[in-house]
Image: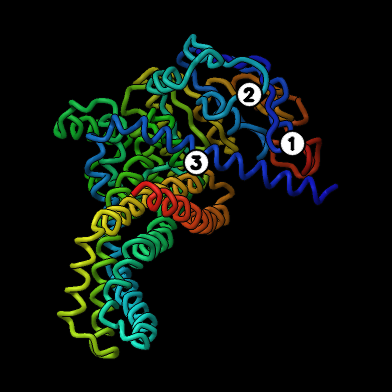
Amino acid sequence: MIKLENLFLKLGGRQILSGMNLHVREGETYVIIGRSGTGKSVTLKNIMGLMSPDEGNIEVMGQSLNTLDHNGFYELRRKMGVLFQSGALLNWLSVGQNVALPLKEHNHKLTSAEANEIVREKLALVGLEGVEEHMPSEISGGMKKRVGLARAIVHNPQVILYDEPTSGLDPVMSNQINDLITSLQKKLGVTSICVTHDMHSAYRIADRIGMMHGGQIIEEGTPDDIRSTQNPYVRQFIEGHTEGPLTANSA
Amino acid sequence: MSFISAIGSRVIQSCEKTGYAVNLFIQTIYWLKAIRYRARSILEQMFVCGVQTFSVTIIVGIFTGMILALQTGITLKDYHLEHLIGVVILETLCRELGPFMTAFILAGRAGSAMAAEIGTMKVSEEIDALEVMSINPVSFLVMPRVIALALFAPILTAYVNIVGLIGGSIVANYQIGVDFSVYFREILNQMQVSSFKLVFAGLFKGWVFGMVIAIVSCANGLKAKDGAAGVGIATRQSVVDAFLLILIFNYFMSNVIEKVF
């Protein structure tokens, strides 16, 4: 479903991706873990087409991003949903307008009543009801993420990308988001890639987990494989030890 | 060598920035095809950028007219030509100062707000979110702002001109001793002689300045990076760039207008 082959990318003189390879199967939830600055979010942005690698190939739903023009990207992205770290809601639009935005932008014939019905349905899927008229500044961080998720799924995407979905949330809200991700995966059958530092979240939602270090995936496996791995980098990361091969400058 | 490379680096940066702004302008023209879906957004921007600037422009317009009347009135009185005070204010305001002052107000008030708003959207991933929703940010954000300012700048310019003439009439009457009827009669006479140059040339300048301010502000906003500090830099830079471009465009447009008409 999503293939990254030998990606290299340098930003500001620093090598971010160094031969990154990744293969995400259809319908699975793949979680990328790793320290800050290892290129996890950059990998997501490459898959979204917001950044281009210096070398290598990215294939999403059978289409090589190298061959796509501007319109091709826009067509492909309509089959993708993205939950940004902050939710990335437009502050001057209400919750309902935010969720309806992609619908109205791509289907000018859609009536307000039809759009409102879809918005209500998607907000209900993420456990929110009666918040359509609220402004983003009036809702909590967890609600913003859920609204962002409702907006990401409003087009019934085949792929959902999550950038740190539980960062900045309390443990209860984090678990609600985790449950939401797993339930959406079951209900919609989507392929998901999630970037996170949160190991509790990773174990809970992942079919497979990949650890990024030095601009590439250094270890990959099911949550049980990762729990029992003897790879010193992964062990240090999941146990959070300050001593080990992951030094301050090794990201 | 480092001095030369620093200059070279600045030149390259300036060229990149100019190229980006020109490209943004071309894209804006391309996205005019979506104008019918952006009517509401254009009206909102006209309100935010234009209507909310009225209160500032009334003060600027009146005092500009008053200063012009005072300075030129004293000199004209020495030559017993004070009855022409309105003509001098009309010529100065409509040709140069009206569009110029309006553009400066718009750059400081509306342009900086645009750069800050779009810059904040950029650093908080909202522009990325638009891209991944397959919504073109130029169509969604830039084009409505450019149209709004291009439409509103000439209106605001005419408003500054009128308010300036009224301000000038007060000083002319009470400080220089020119009767209101004489002041406005001379203005009307002059407008019959050179109405096109006076009115339309100034409004044309306002139209161009409106587009320049919006493009420069949006370009700086879209290039913002590195959080709140980056938004501050983009906002400041948008005002500096707009002021410089207004000056440069004003000179060349004045030249062309004088030669053509």
> Which quadrant of the view contains residue B65?
bottom left
Residue shown at 36% from the left, 30% from the top: B30
- Indicate whether B155 appears above or below B145: below
Could you tell whether A65 is left or right of A117 in the image?
right
> Which quadrant of the view contains residue B166?
bottom left
Q: Nearer the viewer, residue A183 or B179?
A: B179
Chain under label 1? A
Secondary element at tag 1: loop
How did the renderer colour the structure? rainbow
Report which residue position mark 3 lands on.
B21
**x and y, in percent, of residue B147 in the image:** 31, 44
Query: Can you tell which mark lies on residue A13?
Result: 1
Mark 1 to mark 2 CA distance (whole Å): 14 Å
- Indicate whether A13 appears above or below A74: below
Q: Are marks 1 and 2 on the same chain?
A: yes
Report which residue position mark 2 lands on.
A53
Secondary element at tag 3: helix
